[in-house]
Image (tube, grey):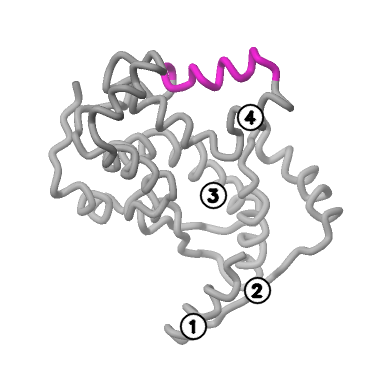
Amino acid sequence: NEVEQAKAVAKQFGVNHFVEEISNKADVFELLDQLAPYYDEPYAGNSMINNHLIAKLAAKGLKVAFSGEGADEVLGGYKWYRKIESFYHQPKLRRIAKRFIAGELSNKSEFLNLYNRSMLGVFNEVNSRKILSETVLAKMRLRKFWHFEEFCIDNNDKVKLAQYIDFKTFIPNHCLQRADISSMANSLDRKSTHLNSSHANISYAVFCLKKK
């Protein structure tokens, strides 16, 4: 819950700030039934709920709104970026030993496994075994090969590499889909200012990314 932080930021910049909280779980389940026709396919991101409600609230007085899609990817804000950075700050011999034990024979495989585990979030191996079949879990583990490997390019900075893959997969397949559907459902024109090409390119200006 970031309500207090949002209030502090709004006060600092002197902008109008509106808060809408949901405390009734029944309202959430009712909303899921309402959202299903808009998505028209399985969608596992719970952020679809708050995105729809924010768009609905904004649409009461606005036709166009700016949103923050892409900010974490451009500015490196996700927690998994810090996990990846910490992993590659380990002594090299320790990493090689772990890779050997796990059967990961290449640097690329090591990174893809780490990135894939990070993207699974709360669906870690222990919890997932309780609710998902082994067949589904196996497909989730293999996702790195058919979904992420295509965009795994040469870059010694693994955080930058993670950001790059996020730009190619997570933003278009999750963030922008969620943003487009929630805004269109409420007749709101949403602008994702962080995804301006000039803005995004600044974060990569120091490194030259070269595809294999």
Residue 107 figure quarter: top left
Image coordinates for residue 130, horizontal then vertical, percent: 73, 27
Label 1 amino acid? Answer: Val
Image coordinates for residue 66, horizontal then vertical, percent: 46, 63
In the picture, the disc for residue 210 is none
Q: Does the magenta segment cover residue 145?
A: yes
- Image-based side of 96 in relation to 98, left or right: left
Which residue sits at x=34%, y=16%? Answer: 100
- Image-based side of 142 in relation to 138, left or right: left
Which residue sits at x=61%, y=42%? Answer: 45
Sequence-first tag of 1 and 4: 1
Q: Does the magenta segment cover residue 58?
A: no
Which residue sits at x=39%, y=44%? Answer: 83
Image coordinates for residue 181, horizontal then vertical, percent: 59, 45
Name the foreground residue: 110 vs 169.
Answer: 110
Badge 2: residue crowd in 10 Å (few <14, some 14–19, many ≥20): few
In the picture, the disc for residue 179 is 3
Q: Which residues are magenta?
A: 133-146
The answer to whether 195 is drawn above or below residue 173 in the figure is below
The answer to whether 9 is drawn above or below residue 209 in the figure is below
The answer to whether 5 is drawn above or below residue 50 in the figure is below
**To which residue does mark 4 refer?**
126
Of circles 1 and 4, which is in front? 4
**To which residue does mark 2 refer?**
19
Label 4 amino acid? Answer: Val
Sequence-first tag of 4 and 2: 2
Residue 157 figure quarter: top left
Q: CA distance from mark 4 to mark 3?
A: 31 Å
The answer to whether 6 is drawn above or below residue 134 in the figure is below
